[in-house]
Amino acid sequence: MTPTKHLSKTRTLTVTIPIAILLFMTSITGCSPQTPTVVDSNLVIPTSDITSTPSFYPIQINGVKMNVIAYRAKDNTIRTAFDACVTCYKTGDGFYRLKGDTLVCSYCGNTCDFEQIGIPSDACSPVAITADDRIDTADTITIPLSFMQKTIAMLENQQTDTSNTNASNMDSGSMDSSSM
């Protein structure tokens, strides 16, 4: 008989990811994703798990699959970001993969040094989750569900706005460079 797992009384739920998603995420990012922990619908990352190699924590918010990247910088601060390129996410392919000591945008090929993770930018870089956006303790980093929902909705709206603009341009007979 197989032992039965019981949820702890702290209401901690470990999210399990199907094997296919794990293999897919490994092929995209170049590393194995971490198993995220969810407490009261918030993503909780133990600080002891965060190293000088970025870790990818898969999440799914309102049907959108994404990773949160966590990294311990050279100055020992913890940096976090969404695995979504600020400028390329709207294409539907603006995610990152590890290549040596950099992250590479899967859409445009731009590289981002690990030290840039979590620093807000308008350039091609992961969408920052700053210390102001999360709750830090000595043992954990907590990223609130409300913040993740708001940010992912903003990213999805950029994608929708781009799709609507391209459809509108095609309807009016004009052509943009993305349709060539």
Image (spheres, grey):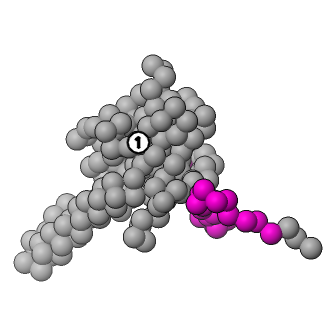
Q: Where is residue 91 in the image (x, y as percent from the top left)?
A: 31, 60
Q: Name the residue under label 1.
A: 135
Q: In this view, does 162 lie to the left or right of 132?
A: left
Occupied quadrant, residue 136? top left
Q: Give the range drawn in magenta.
A: 4-29
- Residue at image location 68% in from the left, 63% down from the top: 7
Q: Where is residue 30 in the image (x, y as percent from the top left)?
A: 58, 46
Looking at numbered disc 1 in the image, what kind of residue is underneath it?
Answer: Ile
Q: In this view, does 77 lie above or below 130?
A: above
Residue sitting farthest toward the top = 75
Can you give x and y, in whole percent of width and height, for residue 94 in the image?
Answer: 37, 53
The residue under the point 25% across, 59% down is 154
Q: Residues within 10 Å of mark 1 (few under 14, many from 20)?
A: few
Verify whether residue 176 appears in magenta.
no
Vertical order, 155 against 104 (above or below): below
State left or right for residue 61 relative to residue 170. Answer: right
Q: What element carries label 1?
A: strand
The residue lying at 60 percent from left, 46 percent from top is 31
Q: Does the magenta stretch include residue 5?
A: yes
Q: Which residue is at a point 63% across and 63% down the rendered structure image?
A: 16
